Image (tube, rainbow, N blue to C red):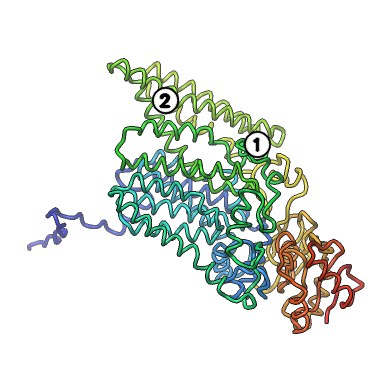
Amino acid sequence: MTTLAPPPAPATQDGRRRAAPPAAPSRLRALFTGPPEDPRWARPALWAILVLATALYAWNMSSVSGNTFYNAAVYSGTRSWKAFFFGALDAGSFITVDKPPFALWVMGLSARVLGYGTWQLMLPMVALGTGSVALLYRMVKRDFGAVAATIAALALALTPITVAITRDTNPDPVLVFLMLLGAAALMKAVRTGLLLPLVWSGVAIGFAFNTKMMQAYVVLPAFFLVYLWAAPLGLGRRIRNLAVGTVALVVSSAWWMVVVDLVPASSRPYIGGSTDNTVWDLVIGYNGFGRIFGASSSVGSQGNGTSFGGEAGLYRLFNSIMGGQISWLIPFAIVALIGGLVLRGRAPRTDAERAALLLWGGWFVLHYLTFALAEGTFHPYYVTAMAPGIAALAGIGGVMLYRAFREGSAAVGVPPRGRVRAWGRAWVLPAAIAGSTVWAVVLLQRVSGSGTLYTVAEVVAGVAGAVAVIGLLLGRFTGRQRLTGIAALAAVVALLAGPAAYSASAAGSSTNGTNPTAGPSTGGMGGAGGMGGGQRPSGSGGPGGGTGTSNSGSAPSGSSSSSSSSQSTGRSASGRTAGGMGDAQVSSAMISYLKKNQDGATWLVAVATDQTASSIILESGEPVISMGGWSGSDNAMTLAKLKSLVKSGKLHYIVVSDSGQGSSNSEISTWVKKNGTAVSAYSGLYRLG
């Protein structure tokens, strides 16, 4: 019997046979073992890092309170598609949060499909955080191999502030993932010269803009520089392609802003954080130049920088508040960037390794200068955006400096000038490891006495660092390559012991929703201890959340309860009181009274600020008006608007106090006290109409 052979693989255009696609079991096996050209340990190591990252981000997820402000907006979006689209704080769509809504959409879709609750909001954040680690690994591996990629992925997964913010409902994990998508597409355009990846890069950064506005643009100078320098095209085509990519960037950035600003103000919510009820003002003011220069026409754009992150200046990211959050690998990253660029100094213009170094170096430097010198409102968790740049440089630079070290140690039989240059390079890696180890010990000594975890980390970092430096030097003089390999592993342990301790601490405790940080308290508003190492900014959980371990409120239908943190102006509304920046204290008993006497009104009550309104929304499940936005100074409520709402029966109750801020608040307060009926059982509460 004749056996029929399988048909030959189809030929390519140049006549060569294309390899037949692997069978399904082979592809599945490769998912866990990696491609055959990779080291056997590479793919299992990646999976181990991804499991570690997921565990850090998702551990004890039900205890994570999240940010009350964004939680309330997500909950409101599950009750109203209008509130969902505009990113309104309340289901009645009176005022928006002070950010564009893309991150709210991500969490809101999860909540609409799976139901509202802590883990439903956290699930996409954990997925995107782990996805960022995987994406960084893929990008670094393409140009520098599995070792560099593994170090970079592990460094990102163990960045303390990244662990803290991913265990939260702030928009930053979404921002970082989108920026990495944009970087991946950009590098594909640089390698191939194709236009479409550049367009997709612009689209990704545009969606990042619709997550956190101008912060998404910090990396753009590096993107433009890398493409203009390294793309394998003529200068004219590079400029033309960049122009097309810029159009894609502008369109994907501006579409939501343009749509919202074209909708009549009477048919949409007030734009929270703006001075003139437009998204454009929010972009260039409160979320733009106000963050950098600390003063603009936008409300709330100045102050708080020194409160949360320390004084602005080049040393800010190394101070007692910020140092333990992000600075562990910064000294090594700086040396790695400079050393890597020197090593690739004579490479061709289109060299992929130098292009990657320029990208990650630009990512790091631009973020560093922006965050260090920002005079406006600055939270420690903002710096999670620079973590991919630091992690990539640590992995890339570590491998490049190690290769230079090996070459320098073996510089025998070469011309004297070349031998001196090679031997000089051989000292860079031990010096970088020694300096970074000393800085890690300094950071851990700052928190000595905060717990056994940090003491152990200090000992491990110091011992491993000494072993790494001594092992490298002994290996250099004795020529024992195995010794240098062991020393390199010890260096990784030394540099990541401190971040691992901080990350484990963050994973083991519920985070503060407004200002999440990792590790022990280090004073100011930036430490895990919150304000002054004691009181913490606001951040309660989902509907029905309580203060501390208490849960005195009932959760709205389809929601789950969670614990909350103390508010900077009072305790959570779902516990005893919710203070208010001009609000009287709002108790749970008052909320129960308001629900019983809502009488068909759209809004349960009007209060001064977002913090108070969000807490009441999450406890009551009803829309609540925030008249003054986040800081209480937005011009969202006017006396004419209040009268109209009362006359139409959409609002019956308002909370006012003698400490109202701004002329419009004073005018409203005077009118309410004159025309409303005080509810004697609750201070500051008035019935209107």
Q: Amino acid at mark 2?
A: Thr
The label shown at residue 319 is 1
| Residue that extends furthest to the front in the rendered view of this protein | 297
Q: Position of residue 321 (x, y in %)?
A: 67, 40
Residue 90 falls in which quadrant of the image? bottom right
Residue 145 is at least partly visible in this image? no
Earlier along the polypeptide chain: callout 2 or callout 1? 1
Q: Is 652 above or below relative to 103?
A: below
Residue 611 is at least partly visible in this image? yes
Residue 271 falls in which quadrant of the image? bottom right
Q: Position of residue 55 (x, y in %)?
A: 55, 50
Q: Residue at x 45, y 35 (%)?
A: 337
Residue 126 falls in which quadrant of the image? bottom right
Question: What residue would you read off at disc 2?
Answer: 484
**Label 2: how many Cα within 10 Å (few below 14, some 14–19, many 20+):** many
**Label 1: how many Cα within 10 Å (few below 14, some 14–19, many 20+):** some
Closer to us: 180 or 120: 180
650 sits left or right of 204 in the view: right
As helix, strand or loop, the secondary structure at mark 2 comes to helix
Check the picture and name the quadrant holding the N terminus. Answer: bottom left
